[in-house]
Amino acid sequence: MEYKIEKILIATDGSEYTEKAIEYGLSLAKLLGAKVYALCVADIAPALSVPLEGSLRPVLELIKNECMEATSEVRERGEKIGVEVECVVREGKPASEIVKFAEENEIDLIVMGTLGRGGLERILLGSVAERVIRTSKVPVMVVRGET
C-alpha cells in the first residue's frame, strides 16, 4: 500500500525546542508538495489555577496572542520556501487538541518537537509529545529540540 502525505500538522508553542520540528515539517512539506497546518493550543488550565485579581481575560488574550504569533512564524517561514501554511489556534489541553484536530482534518502526519526529558523529570512533568504518540491514529514525527 502506498501512503500519500498531503496534509502535515506542525504543532508549535512558540518555544525554542519546536524550531527543529518546524524546519523538518516545512522541509518535508516542500519535498512532498504537502499543505501545512500550524497548530498552537492555548493551554489555559495553568492560568486558571493561579489566583488572580480581577478578570482572567487579559491573561487568556495574552496566551492566545502568543499562539497567533507562533503559528504566524511558521506561515512566514513556509512562504519563504513556497509552502502553503494555514494557521490554527485552539484552546484546551495540547495533546488532546492536537489529536482531535488531526482526526477532524484528515491529517497525514503530525510533526512536533520535544525537550527529550527522561526519567523522573518526564514522569513528573509529562510530555505532550508522548501523549500524542500514545493516542493518535495519525503517524507522529517527533523531533528532539535543543535543550
Image (cartoon, grey):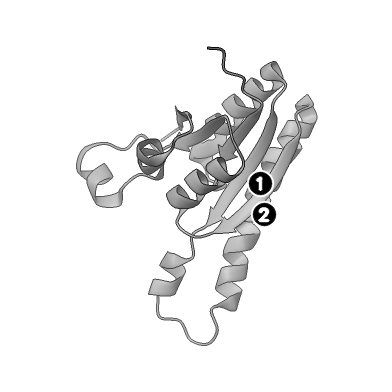
User: Is residue 4 positioned above or below 100 on the image?
Assistant: above
Residue tagged by mark 1?
A: 71
Q: Residue at x 58, y 45 (%)?
A: 104
Identity of the residue drawn at 60% across and 46% down: 39
Q: Nearer the viewer, residue 41 or 5?
A: 5
Location of residue 70 in the rendering, given as x and y in whole percent from the top left corner: 63, 48
Quadrant of the image occupied by residue 90: bottom right
Taking the spot 60% from the left edge, 66% from the top edge, the residue there is 62
Q: Position of residue 24 (x, y in %)?
A: 58, 25
- Position of residue 75 measured from the top left corner of the image (x, y, whole percent): 73, 40
* Residue 102 figure quarter: top right
Give the quarter of the figure containing the C terminus: top left
Please rate how many residues cluster around mark 1, counting C-alpha atoms within 10 Å: few if below 14, some from 14 to 19, many from 20: many
Query: Amino acid under label 1?
Result: Thr
How far is disc 1 from disc 2 in space, using C-alphas? 5 Å
Q: Secondary structure at mark 1?
A: helix
